[in-house]
Amino acid sequence: MEQISELVRQRAPLLSPELQDSLAQRVEARLAGLGPLEALVALEAVSDVMVNGPGAVWVEEGGTLRRTAVTVGESTLHQLIERVVAPLGLRADRTSPLTDARLPDGSRVNVVMPPVAVDGPYLVIRRFRACALRLEDFAPPPVAALLRWLVTARANIVVSGGTGAGKTTFLNTMAAHIPADQRIVTVEDAAELDLQAAHVVRLEARPPSIEGLAAVTVRDLVRNALRMRPDRILVGEVRGSEAFDMLQAMNTGHDGCLSTCHANSPPDALGRLETMVLMAGAGLTLQAVRGQIGAAVDFVVHLARGPAGTRRVVAVAEVRGGPERLATLADAVTLRALPEASPRAFDAPPADPAWLDL
């Protein structure tokens, strides 16, 4: 940046210092950053930047989609995509039209190339804002107190919700209440969790190389995490057969595991877990899978996104055995015998906690 600034001062000495700095920043963004998208990505309220082929750029800002005044030409768009994927050993072209990548700041990037992208290339940048939130930002204080206690009591929790419901941010917030003397191993397809704990080991899946070799899957990492002496295992999101290995971890003494999955409701989350475990090809019957889920998962916390873009906890469901495996939110927060009703015996919560009054 200093070299660029010096060059701008030499070539444009009549500009004011403010204009020189602005020009230097634009040149740097063009050469090494995200070019015309750099200013949009830097906006605090922007969570997603979407380029629908050459031309207009859209953003989600404060929970609302809007079209920006920024435009991106076809050659510039190709350069941006190459600049993102090439350093990671990835490719995005007609032979590999679907590519996922991660920027150095943790933002996720999805690229779709022609011919799959009819009007493409398409580029989506999803920002992950590492801001310090409290559980009270997602739920009323009594429910937040319950969630805080569940984490410290080493309950196995699955956070469910739709796309953009805030699952990763909420998981990050919950993990902040893990005791400082515990070793945490995180497993993610793309590293997004930003835990501020003292003893954290982060594992990130690796896609296959250009030759289609050397892939390291989330399932590989979950298996390896069991050998790393974890006190807690956090799986950023379960999407496939790794759900089987996560349940195995929960059922073999690794209490206090946290994970997320895409689902429309707590019952739907359990149904998706069943499907993903069956995908592992372990030869288990559906009844056996349901038994494992009932023994492993203690609670499902469901998040939803409101019309104004707010993310809130809308259900805390206790996982039980039998045909009715889920309790409602009211059951979860008013059940005085909560520890005994759970699959395992937890330490008793504080006497007369506030959430019992709901």
Image (cartoon, rainbow, N blue to C red):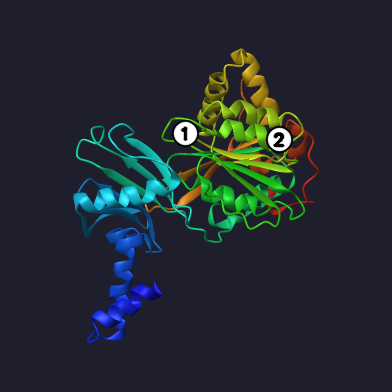
Rendered location of residue 53, percent (x, y): 22, 45
**Residue at 76% across / 38% down in the picture?**
339
Q: Horizontal and vertical percent for residue 80? A: 31, 52
Q: Is 148 above or below relative to 322?
A: below
Disc 1 residue type (three-letter): Pro
Could you tell whether 198 is left or right of 274 in the image? Answer: right
Residue 164 appears in the rendering: no
- Residue located at (32% from left, 48% from top): 81
Q: Secondary structure at mark 2?
A: loop
Q: Position of residue 306 (x, y in %)?
A: 41, 48
Q: Nearer the viewer, residue 201 or 46?
A: 201
Q: Are marks 2 and 1 in contact (CB under 8 Å)?
A: no
N-terminal label among 2 and 1: 1
Residue positioned 66% across, 52% down in the render: 145
Question: Which type of secondary structure does the marked residue at label 1 adopt?
Answer: loop
Of residues 5 and 70, the one drawn nearer to the viewer in this rendering: 5
**Quarter of the figure with the N terminus:** bottom left
Disc sitting over residue 226 in the figure: 2
Name the residue tied to disc 1: 208
Give residue 173's position: percent from left, percent from top.
59, 53
